[in-house]
Amino acid sequence: MPQYLLSVHGVGSDFDPAAGKFGAYSSQEDAESALADTSVFNEKLVAEGHFVFAGGLRSASTATVVDGRGDKPVYTDGPYLESKEYLGGFWVIEAPDLDVALRLAAEGSRACRGKVEVRPFQGLIEQG
Amino acid sequence: MIEEVFRYEWPRVVASLTRRFGDLDVAEEAAGEAFLAAVAAWGTTSPPNPGGWLMTTATRKAIDRVRREHQRAAKYEQALLLQPDVAPVHAVEDDQLRLIFTCAHPALAPEARLALTLRLVAGLSVGEIARALLSSEAAIGQRITRAKTKIRAAHIPFVVPERLTERLDDVLAVIYLIFNEGYLPSSDAELRIDLSDEAIRLARLLHDLLPDEPETAGLLALLLLIDARRAARIDETGELVTLDEQDRSGWDRALIREGHALVRACVRDNRPGPYQIQAAINAVHTAAREFRDTDWPALATLYNQLYNIQPNPVVALNRAVVTAELDGPEAALAAVDRLPLQDYHALHATRAELLRRVGRSAEAYGAYTKAIELAGNPAEVRHLTRRRGELVTVGDASQRARGGLAAQCEFRCR
């Protein structure tokens, strides 16, 4: 069955409630209700057999870019591309076709309060 | 003759193979191979059942192709070939309609949806699509390729959607454009009856499936009422005959009755939309026994209603033609001169007729010339050329100009 990456993009600020930073959310309450809704959505994905993997990411400022193509790996602090919006989390799902994937992505978008990009994985057939 | 058979059969073969094999490239390439084989096998005369011949040959070619591509995965091949025909959703059994909904998928860019449908459902060449959509062949080719790649990679399904009405607008727009390309082709032919018939067939099918959707009824009515005038619209020399000069006894009364009945049902339903209003406009034209009986105030009301929903300059241009009848050519000319449609031949054709009526013949000549340059359809070009040629004559020129202007509706009341 085809697999899709559902990635959530949002503002890249830190999530640090003590410092009054709520990442992509407007308030602590907003963040908590989004997390609760997302958990419900994840359970639904599992129950309906779509779930492969999911995860939320720490802020982009904690990222490290690694270039291992040379003799010695080069490490660079920060995300690959400087941007206002960063990948904040993602799901990997299985769905019979794009119509199902888009419907699930709409539900996930509502649950996590973010825009979702749906992108198909290379299938087994294309890989030969 | 064989070319006509190909024109007609190609989209059907592609749609059928797409449903069966679930792959546009397999379908298109197998269809292409089958048509090449037909050229070699048929000579100059086609067999008694050319469609069946092509479908059988193309299916065999597709099976060969799938077998070659999946030699290493014999089980996959078996599964694909033995898969029974997918049970139709909403009892839609028409492969082409299914393909239309796929081509109108919301995950595809709007401009890609049109190009793809014209290629795969209407069977237009990339060049014809480029002219129909006012774009370049390279851009259209790239658009189609990208859309097909996405359909395949993202697994956009070949089905009629469960919630069909969500994507209805896109499908209606595509059917309308297909009809337009048949009615007023951008290419060398005066009429492409195959495309008009195809669009009407699809509109009828959609209306059968969705009898409660007023815009579906509106589109069907619109196409029928335009098509009813087909025989009277082009004369024996291949020139466009405008509404005022058409032999109205040559209009297809059965189509007009059907169109009028649909419009009356829409009016009773009272959920107006752009296609319904355009159908009503054409109902007014086809209700007039003679051109002079045309109900211009009714047309003005309908165009105002249409402009409220679709405030675009093309609607304003059509409305100006009615304005000329009701308020005179100066008022219409003032409205037309404000419109940002410098690349649209109909703007210049309308200006030419208006300028002619107010006696500004030199300017009218220039406007006809501009319209002729921009018009792609040969029947229109002949008509415009003759009108321009008449400018030197005096006598009854003003009377003819008056009819000619009102008759611009024949170009655009659709």
Image (tube, rainbow, N blue to C red):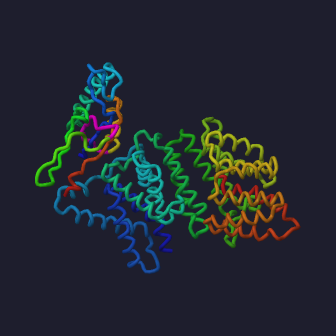
> How far across and down, in percent of the image, does residue B124 sit?
48, 63
B360 vs B283, left or right, is right
Total numbered labels: 0
Depicted B224 relative to depicted A16: above or below: below
Q: Which residue is nearer to you in this view: B312 or B220?
A: B312
> How far across and down, in percent of the image, does residue B305 sit?
67, 40
Residue furthest to the left: A71
B25 vs B239, left or right, is left
B411 vs B64, left or right, is right
Depicted A124 relative to depicted A40: above or below: below
Q: Residue at x 71, y 69 (%)?
A: B385
Q: Residue at x 75, y 43 (%)?
A: B298
Q: Is B313 contained in the magenta span? A: no
Q: Which residue is nearer to you in this view: B306 or B201?
A: B306
> How far across and down, in percent of the image, does residue B404 sit?
77, 60
Q: Is A94 contained in the magenta span? A: yes
B39 vs B356, left or right, is left
Q: Which residue is nearer to you in this view: B265 or A28?
A: A28
> How far across and down, in percent of the image, does residue B326 sit?
80, 47
Residue furthest to the bottom: B43
Which span is picked out in magenta?
Answer: A83-97
| Magenta stretch, overall SS | strand
